[in-house]
Amino acid sequence: MQSKFDKLSFCLLEFPAPAIMVSLDGIVVHMNARAQSLFGDLEAEEYLNHSILDFICEDSIEPAREDLINIIASNTAVTREYHVKLPSGEAFWVEALGSRIEVESEVYDLVVLRDITDMILLQKELEAKEARTSAILNAIPDLMFGFDIDGNIVDFKADHVDDLYVAPDMFLGKNVSNIFPRDVAELTKTIINKVFTTGSTQTFQYSLLKNDKLKHFESRMTMYGDDKYLAIVRNITEQVESQRELQWAKEKAEESDKLKTAFLANLSHEIRTPMNGILGFVDLLKDDLPLAERQGYLDIIADCSKQLLSIITDIIEVSIIEAGQVKVIPTVVNLSKMMSDIFKSLQIKAATSPGVEFHSPEIPENSPISIVTDEVKICQILNNFIVNAFKFTLRGSIHWGYRLASSQELEFFVTDTGIGICADDQSIIFDRFRQVENYLTRSKNGIGLGLSICKSYVEMLGGKIWVESVLNQGSTFKFSIPINRSGAQPMSHKPAMSKVNTYADKVILIAEDDGINYQYQNTVIRKTSATVLHAWDGLEAVEMFESNTKIDLVLMDIKMPTMNGFEATYRIRALCPEVPIIALTAYALEHEKSLAMKAGCNEYLTKPISINDLLSIVDKYLKTDS
């Protein structure tokens, strides 16, 4: 036995690597010094007659058994990596080459070992890094492309195939010049060369047209490996569009601020101008003047007041439109009569413009006699168009009327030979405040709301509005409305006041907290010889009604101290359901009118109220009882 051991020792003594001699049943019969050192300087008794499997960790036991069987069965060498352990329990990795040898007619397995622990740990570290990198890349939803130095696509990752310019099978292995538009391909190659030259990451943006839609991308390109370039591409279409929308909104806001500033400056001018006339001529009326001169001053004051009221009305109307309180009230409209009435109402305006020929309305022969629409709004639109035509036409003519655009549509028009509108301004002429952009140099008055109001009215009526114009030659303003013949409400026409009726036996209660407004109403009502009672607030009105049940008519202001007109109306209506109550208010919103009617008012008049309107409402409710 000693002789055999010596021979085995001699065989392994000069072996340049750790080696173990194992019997065919897996028992260790010898280790050379290098193997003993590898396993922690083992003594002979620590390895002799031990199974080779005693030195192998659990995770490598089964592969080791299979290798022993294979060596025995096939008599071929086997190379494998094993996780082995020291007697102390410390583990490390070895690469083992097992082969068959024969010593004195006995067959053994020779296992040559190489410590690969450092290599395995490095490999595991690299695998962990690759796993982390892969996880990070997989978590990134962006497109990824691998390029070589020539711009050939060698790899890609695309979670969203819709973002790809072409299908994957059409670009993998192809050059960017054969896939992308020329500008994008050249930019990509330029960036690849820049990354190669500088060694730094480069970011660039480009756009691609796909399915008639422009998509925007941002690419970050960097080196990976010695001769490869990784491009991480993100679809930034939404971001680009959002930035553009924000920029557009910013520009619109700045433009709006500019227009509002101009509007406020012009509004101050437009209000102060008629106010200066009113206050100035009121002061002049304090002097002892001839009757004719006084009448002239009064006419000027009336004109200035109307001008001021028009400005205030436009501002209020825009506010009401924005609040969604304007309602369309369809009525049966006699087209010929409506056009004739408008023509007559503008004769004074025509008389003050001697250089302009104002033609009678053009009405087609095949025109319907009547349609169903909001006559008040149609008249306001046409009146605004015609007044503007006079304003911007010094010499020439104004033609106006309507035509049948189709069997279902009427088209109204106003054509002048005035200053015209340049092409750039025609798209914005119906925007609010546009007239006042150059308010310091404008020669015409107005606050720039009229055409905006017209546009809102036309849209409410289901129509369209536009302008056709040539600078220095004239303009044609047009709007169309559908022809409706049903859904109308009866149109109420105020009778003209030919004389003032007397109601000496009637009592009228005026609830009004403003002394000037009361004085005006009282002066007008006194013309009828009716008895007038005055309440300074809603509570006083209720108390007067409780003490005097013979009141025949109530003129009720809405905004009053102590008790408002709504509450006062509600209480008076409980005391006397039959008495007519008329709301007279400076509020012009549809909501306020609705509240007044719900409280029990019979009618709703908005201040300022003309003498004719006030006497007409008195007649309406008292004449039948006289």
Image: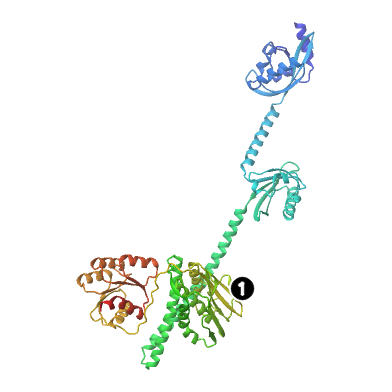
Q: Quadrant of residue 156?
A: top right
Instruction: Kindly state the secondary structure of the residue where label 1 is placed.
Output: helix
Q: Position of residue 522 (x, y in %)?
A: 29, 80
Q: Nearer the viewer, residue 318 or 14?
A: 318
Name the side, left or right, on which 106 lies relative to 447: right
Name the side, left or right, on which 379 lies relative to 583: right
Residue lying at the far left in this picture: please name it. 547
Name the side, left or right, on which 298 lies relative to 38: left
Above or below, 38 relative to 199? above
Other-residue count near label 1 (Cα within 10 Å), few / some / many at <14 / 14–19 / ≥20: few
Tell me if I can see residue 121 in this picture: yes
Name the side, left or right, on which 26 lies relative to 557: right
Tell me if I can see residue 85 in this picture: no
Residue located at (69% from left, 26% from top):
117
The residue beneath circle 1 is 423
Q: Three-letter amino acid code at disc 1?
A: Ala
Q: Quadrant where the N terminus lies?
A: top right
Q: Quadrant of residue 521?
A: bottom left
Residue located at (33% from left, 67% from top):
597
